[in-house]
Image (cartoon, rainbow, N blue to C red):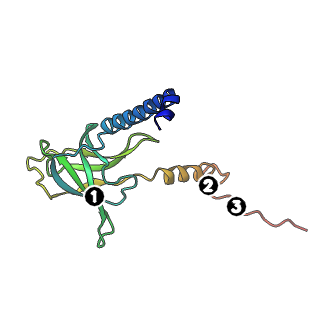
Amino acid sequence: MRALFKDNIVEALVGLIVVLVAVGFVLFAYQRTQAGATVDGYVLKARFPNVAGVSAGTDVRMSGIRVGRVQSQSLDPASYEAVLQISIDKALKLPIDSSAAITTEGILGGTYVQLTPGGDSTMLKPGEEITETSGAADLMGLIGSFVNRSGDSKGGDSKDGAAPAAAEPAAQ
């Protein structure tokens, strides 16, 4: 075995360097995305009609700054709405009339929960629910409806919007 390493020392060193660089990339990505970071805070609930693109670990942001994460999601069997449990930074106190919306960073961007603070002086307590919510927009549905309606002409050829009169049969 020692003779094998002695004969192929250059290949062994290159292999070791490749493995070390790969481990470095994984550690960098892990730290950069804050995948292991936990939010030390309190949990709130929010109900949405549609949570497409949201899963456990999704960012919760306010003014573009991450202030929490989605802890879990479930379906309420009575109302058929999605219920998100979100963990909010303990230093952030939200007014009771705050709102939550599921938003994307752009056409191809990631999805996150956007919080907008209200103006009430009463603050939400741990375990309470954000009642003002807005679900995720169905972008593919919007694009599909735009494409399907792009060739429609409303009212036919008539300028006043009335339907064109039926053609009379030709006289023989």
- In the displayed structure image, the side of residue 42 where residue 59 appears, left or right: right
Q: Amino acid at mark 3?
A: Ala
How many angstroms separate mark 3 from mark 2 (CA)? 11 Å
How many angstroms separate mark 2 from mark 1 (CA)? 50 Å
How many angstroms separate mark 3 from mark 1 (CA)? 59 Å
**Residue 72: mark in rendering:** 1
**What residue does disc 2 label?**
155
Q: Tag 1, which secondary structure?
A: strand
Image height of 152 relative to 76, above or below: above
Determine whether label 3 and label 2 are within 8 Å by CB.
no
Q: Residue at x 51, y 35 (%)?
A: 4
Determine whether label 3 and label 1 are within 8 Å by CB.
no
Q: Residue at x 47, y 50 (%)?
A: 139
Q: Nearer the viewer, residue 85 or 29?
A: 29
**Residue 146: mark in rendering:** none
- In the displayed structure image, the side of residue 48 where residue 153 appears, left or right: right
Q: Nearer the viewer, residue 21 or 105?
A: 21
Crowding at mark 1 (Cα within 10 Å: few <14, some 14-19, many 20+): some
Image height of 163 relative to 57, above or below: below
- Quarter of the rendering occupied by the C terminus: bottom right
Q: Residue placed farthest to the top in the image? A: 10
N-term mark: 2 or 1: 1
**What residue does disc 3 label?**
165
